Image (cartoon, helix red, strand yellow):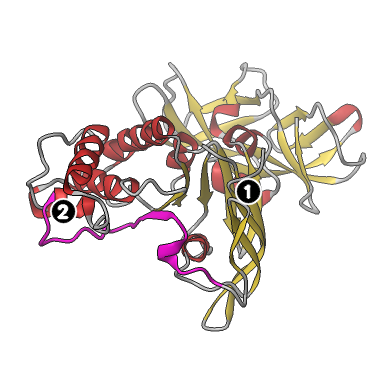
Amino acid sequence: MAPLLRVEQIECRYQQQRVVERLSFEVQPGEIACLLGPSGCGKTTVLRAIAGFNPIHAGRIELQGQTIATPSVAVPPENRGIGMVFQDYALFPHLSVRDNITFGLTRLSGAERNRIVEHMLELVELAGMSNRFPHELSGGQQQRVALARALAPKPKLLLMDEPFSNLDTELRRQLSVEVRDILKEEGISAIVVTHDQDEAFTVSDKLGVLAEGYLQQWDSPFEVYHQPANHKVASFVGEGKFVRGRALAGGMVETDIGLVKAHRVAWDQGDEVDVFLRPHEIVPGCNGCDVRGEVIKKEFLGTTTLYTFQLVNGRVVESTFINQDFRVGEEVGLRVETDNLVAFRVDERAIAS
């Protein structure tokens, strides 16, 4: 299947300073992709380049096999067939919900515009609100109107720039699921930009992690989480800490928190290895465990408790326990339990087993 969007080796700059370079990825028809990364990594710059608001200084962008951007050629944004939902919604405050949605659809008859409005309002669960104005709506409702307006012209591709960042956590989670369902129902391909890993995992079929101007990894959310390409990806998509270790025979790695085993090995015996341990992978061990940690902090989270332990050598690790209640100052035996050890040779070559 030919990709809907192909981004090939693009470079973007801001006031002559490189923001991203050698960036390539593809989005398939009906696919929802996400660009994830910290503030300032270039996510929005890439999105705006695809939309046509920013130039590219190298590479090529193609949509449905047609070139829409090179350093010397740029199809105007209004001719690209791309919709965009901005972080601040960008609704027209003086226009009603109906007029916001139909803005730009002047070539259609009144009857056709009415049909589109009714369909869009039903799709985003705002039926009956066509005559309201943006200031009469909640943040979540404004976001739904912005989505409806972007979908009304039936774009080939929808771009969403931090679409849920102005909403509270619960509403952000709810809308993430709803927007994904809407896009799938309408068969619209989309690229979502976010710094929130939970949002990225919820929405996307393909996930790209951006850091330091480069696309560090482009894969399914499952693979990015369980087989991160390098230190940067592991640190950003998984709450955990690196523990330095030394490779032994048989895939074993000796660390401050005991021996851990990798099922796939790409290092030599004696190499230094960084092991990435997530809180749920550090579990309470037996009283006779070789590794013991003192509880220096605890945070009750409802179904789990997040503990911070200090090991004998001073290293600090975090662990989440279920149905375990230890006191601050108590010493606890610890061990690592994981079926998917993520580790990197110190030269940052990624291993996941």
* Residue 131 image position (x, y, % from top left): 7, 46
In-front residue for pair 152/264? 152
* Residue 107 image position (x, y, % from top left): 27, 56
The span shown in magenta is 74-97
Q: Which residue is mark 2?
A: 99
Which amino acid is tagged 2?
A: Asp
Q: Residues within 10 Å of mark 2 (few under 14, many from 20)?
A: some
Q: Main secondary structure of the magenta part?
A: loop
**Residue lying furthest bottom in this view?**
16
Query: Is residue 223 depicted above or below 236 in this figure?
Result: above
**Position of the C terminus by quadrant:** top right
Asked if one can make out residue 314 in the rendered structure from this viewpoint, the answer is no
Q: Which residue is mark 1?
A: 26
Task: Tell me what residue is drawn at x 57 percent, y 36 percent.
Answer: 221
Task: Tell me what residue is drawn at x 15 percent, y 49 percent.
Answer: 97
Which amino acid is tagged 1?
A: Glu
Q: Which mark is residue 333?
A: none
In-front residue for pair 349/28? 28
